[in-house]
Amino acid sequence: MTVLGLEAGLVTADGAALAAFYVDGFGFTVERVLEFPQGTVRRLQNGGAQLKIFEPSDRPEALDSRPWNGAAGFRYAALHVDDAAAVVASARDAGGTVLTGVTSHRPDACFALIADPEGNVWEILAEGRP
């Protein structure tokens, strides 16, 4: 069995605003907006990364307020990028919160942690290329 891709999904009360952050902060483009009786799905893409932002018809509850690593389960995702510092600056300027600045963690590799305006956490990874 081969996995052909992974598409992360976020649930929000304001899909347009959250999509705008991902466009401005992480360089995604909105590929499609789909309307369903259950709500609106915005499908975003940047390179090989795909993201769905779902705005339910019924307003969702707020995100769990514990730190990103304070509970088990799906709590963060990683974006592999070519320039971590540029992505962190762009995300910060678009309204994201830098939780951990760009940090080298092994030769030719660095990471950072960014929270979007709703508190969803992303690990930004830049690794050297052969």
Image (cartoon, rainbow, N blue to C red):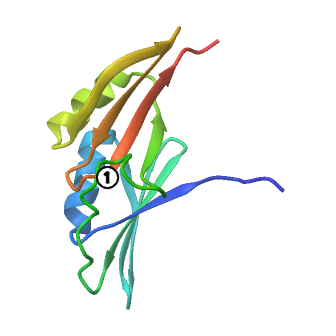
At horizontal 59% and vertical 54% (from top left) the residue drawn is 6
Q: Secondary structure at mark 1?
A: loop
Is residue 43 shown above or below 102? below
Q: Nearer the viewer, residue 44 or 59?
A: 59
Q: In the image as oriented, which residue stretches furthest toward the bottom? A: 37
Is residue 40 shown above or below 9? below
At horizontal 38% and vertical 42% (from top left) the residue drawn is 122
Quadrant assignment for the N terminus: bottom right
Numbered marks: total: 1
Q: Is residue 94 left or right of residue 66?
A: left
At horizontal 39% and vertical 21% (from top left) the residue drawn is 83
Residue 63 in percent (x, y) is at 27, 64
Q: Which residue is mark 1?
A: 120
Residue 127 in percent (x, y) is at 53, 20
The quadrant in which residue 36 appears is bottom left
The quadrant in which residue 115 appears is top left
Is residue 91 shown above or below 15? above
Q: Is residue 29 left or right of residue 109?
A: left
Quadrant assignment for the C terminus: top right
Badge 1: residue crowd in 10 Å (few <14, some 14–19, many ≥20): some
Q: Is residue 12 left or right of residue 47?
A: left
Residue 31 in percent (x, y) is at 42, 59
Q: Nearer the viewer, residue 41 or 121?
A: 121
Q: Amino acid at mark 1?
A: Asn
Q: In the image as oriented, which residue stretches furthest toward the right? A: 1
